[in-house]
Amino acid sequence: MSYRKLVIGLALGACALVAPALAQQVTRIVVPFAAGGGTDQYCRILAQELNKQGLNVIIENKPGASGILAADYVARAKPDGQTVLVSSLGTLANNSVLYDKLPYDPAKDFAAVTQIAYQPAIVVGRTDLPYKNIKEMVAYAKQNPGKINRGSPGAAILTNLAPIAFEKEQGFSTLHIPFNGDAPALQALLGNQIDIHGTSITGSLPYVKAGKLRVLGVMDSKRLPQVPDAPTFKEQGFDMEATLWYSLSVPAGTPRPAIERLNKAVNQVIADPDFVARARAIGMEPRGGTPEELDKFIKAEADRWLPVLRGLNLPKQSH
């Protein structure tokens, strides 16, 4: 064998050994929604910034079955910190009530990394309604029982659960009309088929800015920067907060150092003012924290919302 062939052979052999090692360094953030949505957009700008720190992050979309496909995929992945789930109340709590049998255990199959963002639930209404905010809407509802039609993206979604809890607390009710997603509900609202709608700012913002819809109230401790004139529930005399939140989870058994590395990198990104501005432009509010804080938060959210969900007596689904 010639010296040239020997060198080439050794080089190719080295490449073959190195390639798998490099491939293992890719971190997949698995998004349980289709590409193009608000959560997907947010995760992509997060990945861009993480890559600037030297991480090799890619986004992998696995939509379907209320996040079950994505959650099961990550739960079964090697616990090395390289496969990460974008988790939420749905995947970590609600699905245990909605489905007969899950292929994963929300309580045992994941380890918390960090929160990454949240969106306050809001209630929007048409601009021709006889009430301009939540306080006026409550008074109207009590004086006119059964006159308000309220839409939601789906019965089991927080933007329906939160209004249900609020109505029960305040002693009034609306006629709930669930839709298959936010977009058709917003179109029904614009078409005068419903009066109000529980949602987040992402889908409704263009219509609010165009003067076609009005934000009646924000379920957060502070006003939304995208619509600074819209009052919070608390400002109107109601102690009501509810948020759609997103976090990162890894397979149970992932080494603590791997979790801490990812936690540190993500929290560094979401503290950057430029990143915050980009996130807010798509309706997201960055929020981080420790794994312990996330575990405590998940438990509190499940304790708060699962009884409301069970109270709906929805039929169990199969996946």
Image (cartoon, rainbow, N blue to C red):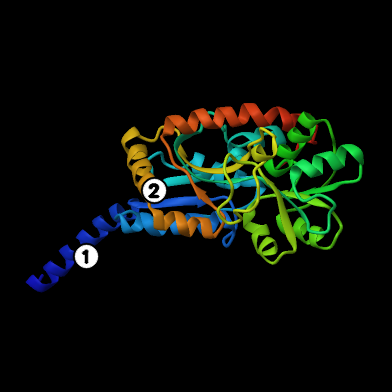
Secondary structure of the residue carrying numbered label 1: helix
Q: Residue at x 28, y 52 (%)?
A: 21
Any mark on residue 254, and which? none
CA–CA distance in space, label 1 to label 2: 43 Å
Picture coordinates of residue 73 (x, y %)?
53, 45
Query: Relative to 96, is 8 on the left or the right?
Result: left
Locate the C terminus and report the quarter of the image it occupies: top right
Neighbor class of circle 1 (other Cα within 10 Å; few <14, some 14-19, many 20+) is: few
* Disc 1 target residue: 12
Any mark on residue 271, and which? 2
- Most foreground residue, 285 or 12: 285
Neighbor class of circle 2 (other Cα within 10 Å; few <14, some 14-19, many 20+) is: few
Locate the N terminus and report the quarter of the image it occupies: bottom left
Picture coordinates of residue 216 (x, y %)?
72, 49
Q: Please identify the quarter of the rendering in which residue 218 is found.
A: top right
- Most foreground residue, 285 or 181: 285
Q: Along the polypeptide, which appears first: circle 1 or circle 2? A: 1
User: What is the three-letter code of the residue carrying label 2?
Assistant: Ala
Picture coordinates of residue 291 (x, y %)?
42, 33
Picture coordinates of residue 281 (x, y %)?
53, 60
- Most foreground residue, 172 or 247: 172
Query: Relative to 10, is 162 on the left or the right?
Result: right
Q: Residue at x 85, y 52 (%)?
A: 130
In this view of the protein, can residue 319 be seen by the observer? Answer: no
Q: Residue at x 33, y 53 (%)?
A: 55
Query: Relative to 274, is 297 on the left or the right?
Result: right
Q: Please identify the quarter of the rendering in which residue 212 is found.
A: bottom right
User: What is the three-letter code of the residue carrying label 1?
Assistant: Leu
